[in-house]
Structure formats: structure tokens, C-alpha cells
Image (spheres, rainbow, N blue to C red):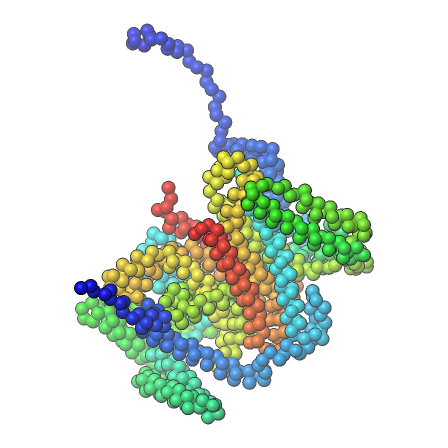
Amino acid sequence: MSDITSSAYVRRDLLTERPAPVKTTGFIGLVRTRLFNSPTNILLTIVGALLLWFTIVPSVRFLMVDAVWTGKDRTACLTENAGFTVGACWPYIQAKLPQLIYGFYPEAERWRVNLSLILAAALLLPLLIPRLPAKGLNASLFFFAFPVVAFFLLHGGGITGFGLSWTAGLLQLFDDSIIGAGQALLSLGKTSAIAPLFWVAGNLIVLVGSAIYWLIFPLTWLRDQFQGTGQSVWADFAITAAIVSLIAFVLGGGVRTGGRALTSSIATFMAIAVVIKLMGLDHGGLPVVTTNLWGGLLVTLVVSVTGIVTSLPIGIALALGRRSTIPLIRIFSIAFIEFWRGVPLITVLFFATYMLPLFLPGNFTVDGLVRALIGISLFTGAYQAENVRGGLAAIPRGQGEAAAALGLSWWKTTSLIVLPQALRHVIPNLVNSFISLFKDTSLVSIVALFDLLGSLRASFSDPKWSTPSTAFTGFAFAGIIYFIFCFGMSRYSLFVEHRLNAHRRN
Amino acid sequence: MSTEARKPPAQIALKIRRVLGGKAGWNGVAVQFAFAAILGWIGYEIVSNARANLENQHIAAGFGFLRNNAGFDVNQTLISYTGSDTFLRVFVVGLLNTLVVSVVGIFFATVIGFIVALCRLSPNWLLSRVGEIYVEIIRNLPLLFQILFWYLAVLAALPNPRQSISLLGLAFISNRGLVIPRPIGESGFEAFLAVLAFGIVASLALRIYARRALFQRGQMIRIWPYVLGLLFGLPLATMLVSGVPFTFEVPQLKGFNFAGGSRIIPEFVALTLALSTYTAAFIAEIVRAGILSVHRGQMEAGSSLGLSRGTTLRLIVVPQAMRVIVPPLTNQYLNLTKNSSLAVAIGYPDLVSVFAGTSLSQTGQAIEIIAMTMGVYLLISLLTSAIMSVYGWRVSRSLGA
């Protein structure tokens, strides 16, 4: 104590308080540092405020303040009746809502659409939340089971056979075509200069065709046996289940390890049987609603979900093909990808609508919606291929080499080691492609399908609701729907990107 | 006793195997044969079905229809066209319309995109939020939605020509489109053009000379006064000598419509508006990412060398940012060109609309017409990607990588 008092200098009085530093955080700080810190910035702030003032205020006025909320027809939304400058005409949306969501889907059957949407949401949401378990089962349900169930729910109709009959029918069609090609070559051989060559090739192809015919004969014979009995679906189902389960058992490793494959195969077939029984597919199923009655948001969602489900396998196959070392497959994949990426989607839709029917056998008509779906799948598949290729390129070579050193085959290396990692890498890019796919579904309205935008445009021409603000109201409504879907997806992709890059953050 | 170095075993068989079958060897060759057989079978099916279907519909395959008379009118043509012209001319008219809307759209998209990018990069909080809102709204709405919005809602809500909105009394906007003054060439027009062309060429030559002087001899030459004189002074002087090169014919309201001036159809206005604002949102993000990709240290290094802020930006930051910006920017230009095919939804006479739309429904030659239309777009995008790979090669060479 005495040491301190005797030292040279000790301050005895308190210093006066310094003023608090200028606040740089919080709202005041933000205003001070980012809005009004210099003359130019003040000017820019005023410009920004003016821009917002002249866009947000009129929008809010139009959507809420000046809007008409109730009414029976267009007279409610006219300025002279309402007594003020009318903004949005919401009764018009109320009147047109069923058309904008279901199109001309029969009113009594709309529960089927709702049920499909609920099913889709129930399967999709757990898939999107990373914390939830059983991603494999969930994904296979969404990508394989759901499309089939949704088809029978939305379109209706039943089945007359099962796996066996379908396989037999398909193989027979293929075989007929091969034999037809061989015979065409033979007949060409009579007039051409290199006749013997054609003759040999033609005979060879016909020979292959008849070999296939005898090879598939047991299948077709079995199918013909079923056709007579009343229980063809269930008999076919039982035989298909038995054959597939047996194959799964044998491939799974026989008595030693095949039990697991056998149980999962049997469980799958039991589930399929339950679905068939529940929906009554064996005796006609639900009443058929043809796709020309579909419309509105339903078509938008059907097209985008189908596009998402089908484009991913196409994209993976093309990406693997492009990286293959086998020349023909690589060249084909590159040409295919570059072709579809080089043309606008609308020409693809024209191609699918006008050109595709010419390429199919004359007795074979394809539904308009299905044609558009084929076009969109091929188009999106090419874009997804480039995304997946980016992911494949990001996987270090060592991964594949390590798998090869362990003795895994190419298929196992790809499906167990490379693809899972590659796909995880590119989830954000895939979701971004899905966003553009969702936006691009609006193009189907050009080829006479009534999606959300097409139904909206059709509803403008209703004289019962033609007012000056009808078009703006309709666009506001559709715009909000599109925005919610696209913005939601883009936020989700950001979230996944953030999660994937968690190890890189500091 | 010395042993000769053993010769390596002949690799010819191995090399052939590698070329023919890739890493998979002879298995790969077998896979290729199977794949080729499948492709051949699909091709055969397509050709035979198409032939049978065309025969049933009594359509003659081939491009002979291009010489037939089209017999319909097109409401915007850059080259002279009447209903009695051939389908080939329809094709050219549509192609030119596609190109003109793409070029105009690209110009405005670039301008708007750079402005929005600057807004988003601005230190001003409010302005960067405004830029962000613009980008988010525009990018999350379908392009077709926006085209239809401009065409069916905004342009349709404009007054008729009698009450049209006047811009400085020179241009008029109404629901019939945009009417602008039309330049009319006068006597001094050729001389003016020639002098202007000379000015541009001379300025470019001057610039090359100045750069060479700078890089080879380290000599700075100030060229901007000469360039200014060449580009503006010389043409002005010519104007004084040989008279005004052109005058503008200002549109006048006569009766229910405008006389004089040139009319731009509302479809063109709506399409250009939608395409340029939509693509601008994407360009803004590209430009922002490009500028942010240049490390801060570059700017600081520039100023520590004694360069001014403007010079640092011009010589150090922008060239590096451009390297990141140009490839995706070109991609956006390509997208805009492809997206201009959405014109068919509002009836702007572009290639898809008049050729794949009207001509297809008149002739039924689906295969030829759609192949030609797809071919045009494919050619454009392949050319662009070829140019871009040359650019990428030059950039990587200049980096010494």
C-alpha cells in the first residue's frame, strides 16, 4: 500500500466519461452506415425509396385496398358500380378457381386429384427433410410406386393382366417388328445390286426373330391360358410374383443369403396386391377421366412431377454414357445431349406433338399429354445429364480405383461408390433444373394443353367476367402460385447447398 | 557379354482394342454392336412407320413444298414479302424476325442486367435490396407468364391511339404498339456514312498503334482527343459542308391512327420487354458473381502500385471479372435467342410462329419443317459454343495454364 502512494505518479481523480461511440449496429446503425453516410448514398437512398414507393404502394392498393372481394359477375368489378377505381377482382378468381386447379375434371371425381396431391405431399416432404430416416424406401416409393398409383387414381381404368402378360405382349411386339424388318430386307434384296448381302442379312434377322419366337413361346402360351379364365389378373399376378421372387432369391445368393431378397420381393408384391384390391384394378378400377379434361394446376404438377421423375434416370444414363470409354456410346450420348440442349423447348414440344405420331405405327395413337411428357422428359434429361456429369467429375479418381482394387465390378462401383457421392454433390443443381422445369411446364399451353397458365388465358375470354382489371387479377393470382413454388424450391436448394458445404464454412 | 535391351511387346492389338472398345476391351466392342443393332432397329421402325403414315395422309416427303406459294400475310417483315411469295421466303422472314428480336433483346438485357448488378453491389442497403427483389421476382416467374402479362395485361390496358401516351411529342405508345420517328435519308447521307465509317476505322487503327507503342516501347500516347475528333468532329464538319444527312419524320395523329413514322407492333414490344427484363435478372447475377470473384487484394495491389481507382478498375478488376462473366453471359444470350421462340404464344411472327406454326398447319410437312426449325437453333448454339471454346482456349493460354 505504501509502495503505491510513494511511487512517482498515481492518478487520483476519475477521467471524464467519453461519449458513447457512434452506433454501427441495429437499425440506427444500418441507417447511418449503409443509407445516409455520404451525399451520393443519400441520393441513392432517395432513388431506391422512390422506386419502392412507385411499385409496392400501387401493388398493395391493387391487391388489397382497392380490391373487390365479393360479387356474382363482372358488374361487381366495374368502377361505376363499385364507386371507386377498382383494383383486383377477386370474385373472378373465386368463380374460376375450380377451372384453374382442376381444369374440366368432373366435379364428382375431384377427390381423386386431391388424394393424389396429398399422397405426393406425404411422400415428398419426408424425402426433403434430411433428418428423417428410410430415404431409400421413401425415394423408391416416390419415384416408382407413386407415379403408377397416381396414374390409376387420376386417369382411372383397370388392368386385364399383370407382369407376365405385359412382358409377353411387349416381347411379341418386338419380335414381330424384327421379323418384319428381316422380311423387308429380303424383299429389298430382290431388286438391289448387292442382293446376296441383303438376302443373307434378311435371312439372319428372320432366323433371330423366329428363335426369339420359340424362346418366348412359354410366356405367350401361359398368357393365352389366362385370357379364358375370369381370374386372369390374379393368376397372372401370382405367377409373376413367384417368378420374380424366385429370381430375386437366386440372384440374392440362394439358400445362404437370399432370404432378405426373397422377403423384400414378397413384401413388395403383397403391397402391390393390396393396392390392386383397394383400387379395384382387377375389375375395371375407377371411372376413366381422359386427359383432355385435365387442366389447371393439376396439369402443371403432373407435367413437372413426371418430368422430374423421368428426367433423372435419363440424365444419369446419359451422363454415364458421356463418360464411357466405349466410342459409340460416348458419341451417341454427346450427340443426344448437345442436340436437346441446343434447341428451344417449344420446338421440342412441336416435335413431340406433330412429328412423334408420324414415327409410331399407324394403329398406335399417343395421348396429347403423353406426347408433351415425352418431349419434356427428353429435353430435361439432357440438361440433367450435364448436372450429373458435373457431379461425376467432382468425384476423385481414387474412389473408383479403390473400388476396383476391392474387386467390385463397374456396375457396383458406379451404383454403390461413385453415383451416391456424385448425386449428393449436385442436389442444388438438380433442384435448380427442377425450378426451370417447373417454369417451363407453362409452355405446354402452346401445344393446346390447359395448364395453369393456359386455363388462366382461357378464362380471360369469358365475357361474364371481362372487366379492365380481370387480366391483372388473373396474373396476380397465377404469379403468386408460381412464385411460391419456385421460391420455395430455390430456398430449399440454398439450404441443401449450405448443408453440403458445412465442412467448408469457417 | 552384354544383353540387348528387350524390345517392348507389340502393342498394336492392344491399341486397336482400346480404340474399338474403350477400357472394356472386346466386351466394349460387343456392347457397341448390340447398341448399334438397337439403334438400327429403332431407325428402321421410325423410317418405315413414317413412310407408311405419310402415304396414308397423302403427303409427299421432301423439300419441294418450299417453292410453293405461302398465301398468308406476315405482319412484320424486314424484307419485302407478300402472300404470293414462297415458303422459303417465309422461312427467311421468320428467321430475320427472330434475329432482330434477339439482338434488340440482348442489347436491353445487357443494359438492364448491368444496372441491376451495380444496384445489388451498391454499398447502399436500400438499393441493393431493390435489386435483390427485382432478381428474385423475375427469376421465379415463368418467362411465358411474363410475356403474356406484358401482352395481355399491360399493353392491352394502354389507351387507344387517339389517347396514346406521348413521349416528348416524338414517340407514342398505345395499344396498337409503339410509333417512333422514322429517319429519312437526305442528300448528304452517303458522304456522312462514309466519313463515319472512316472515323471508326481510323480510331481503331489509332488504338492499335497506341497499344503497340505502350507495350513495345513503354510510350504512353494520349489518343482520346483524336478519337473524339475523328468520331464526332469529322462527321459534323461533313454535315456543315454537304448538308443534313437525314431528317426525322415525326408521326402525326390523323383520324383514328398515326400517319408517318414507323410503327413497332405490340407483339414486338411485349416480347422485347419480357425477354430483356427476364434475361437481365440472370445477367445481373452473373455480373455480380463475376465482380465478387475478383479478390479484394487485386484492388489494393493496384492502388499500392499508384494506379487511380478508375484505372485499377479498368485495367485490373474488370479484365479478371470479364474472364468469369463472358462464358455464362454468352450462354444467357443464347438462352434469350432460344426463348424468343415463345413469340408463338402471342403471335409475333418469328421463325417458330410463321414457319413451324402457320406453314406447318398449311402444308402438313411436319418432318421437314420441324427439322429445319430445330436445325437453325442448333446451328446457332453450336456456332456459339464453338466460339466460346476458342475463347476459353485463349483465356487459358493467356493465363499460361
Q: Could you tell me residue B212's position as x and y percent?
A: 58, 47
Locate residue B196 relative to residue A191 in the image: left or right. Answer: right
Q: Could you tell me residue B3's position as x and y percent?
A: 20, 65
Looking at the image, which residue sits at the far bottom? A190
Q: Quadrant of residue B4?
A: bottom left
In which quadrant will I find the C terminus of chain A?
A: top left
Q: Please report the residue visible at 48 percent of the width from the left and 40 percent of the height from the top.
A: B298
Q: Could you tell me residue A225's position as x and y percent?
A: 33, 86
Q: Please report the residue visible at 70 percent of the width from the left and 47 percent of the height from the top.
A: B230
The answer to whether A333 is drawn above or below residue A172 in the figure is above
Q: Is residue B186 visible?
A: yes
Locate residue A497 relative to residue B277 in the image: left or right. Answer: left
Q: Please report the residue visible at 48 percent of the width from the left and 65 percent of the height from the top.
A: A338
In which quadrant will I find the N terminus of chain A?
A: top left
Locate residue B39 relative to residue B381 in the image: left or right. Answer: left
Q: Could you tell me residue A499's position as x and y percent?
A: 38, 49
